[in-house]
Amino acid sequence: MRLHGIYLTIIVVGILGAVGWGAYRYYVDSQTRIAQLTANNAKLETAQAQTQAAFDAYRTNIEQEIENFKAEIVRQKALNEDLSENLEAVQAANQKIAQLLADTDIIKNSLADPQLSESKINEQVDQFFGAIGCATGGNCLHTSPGEGNSNSAGSGNSTTN
């Protein structure tokens, strides 16, 4: 029976050793998995933080672009209003010029006093081109009516019979 006791002890020690080895392997495997999951969690948190930061920067950029676009729309609206006002002023000036031309008989005035008509026409042409030069940023040759020629004080409607 002694031999049975030794075999029984060897079997019990073998079973306890196998259970101990299994517990040790389970513990090591669990610790390895916990370490891997912790590392993966840290990577995911870092990736999520980077994604959130990029999204916040993108949102801020888009909001700034929207604000810039709104400001540009307001600026364009103001420019359009200025252009409309300028157009109305130019149209009114064109109406005056058209009325002046309708009221002036250039042929009759030219026949009556050709030199006076020529000087008035030249003066007006010089003023016209001077105004174009000023408007386009070139040399300003624009003179006020009546500055250059003493004969230009009239309205251009000389009606001599």
Image: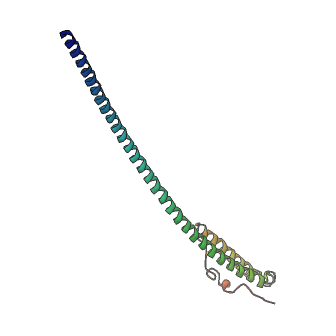
How many marks can you see? 0
**Viewer-closest of 59 and 66:** 59
- How is the rendered protein coloured? rainbow
**Viewer-closest of 45 and 135:** 45
Q: Residue furthest front?
A: 1
Question: Looking at the picture, how far across and down is residue 138, in whole percent?
Answer: 59, 66
The relative height of residue 38 versus residue 125 in the rendered view (above or below) is above
**Viewer-closest of 120 and 100:** 100
Q: Is the N terminus in the top left, top right, bottom left or bottom right quadrant?
A: top left
The relative height of residue 40 versus residue 87 in the rendered view (above or below) is above
The answer to whether 94 appears left or right of 5 in the picture is right
Question: Looking at the picture, how far across and down is residue 104, in whole percent?
Answer: 77, 84
Q: Residue furthest bottom?
A: 161
Q: Residue at x 53, y 62 (%)?
A: 69
The answer to whether 12 appears left or right of 120 in the picture is left
Q: Is the C terminus in the top left, top right, bottom left or bottom right quadrant?
A: bottom right
Q: Residue at x 74, y 83 (%)?
A: 99
**Viewer-closest of 86 and 39:** 39
The answer to whether 112 appears left or right of 29 in the picture is right
Q: Residue at x 51, y 61 (%)?
A: 66
Question: Looking at the picture, how far across and down is residue 158, in whole percent?
Answer: 75, 87
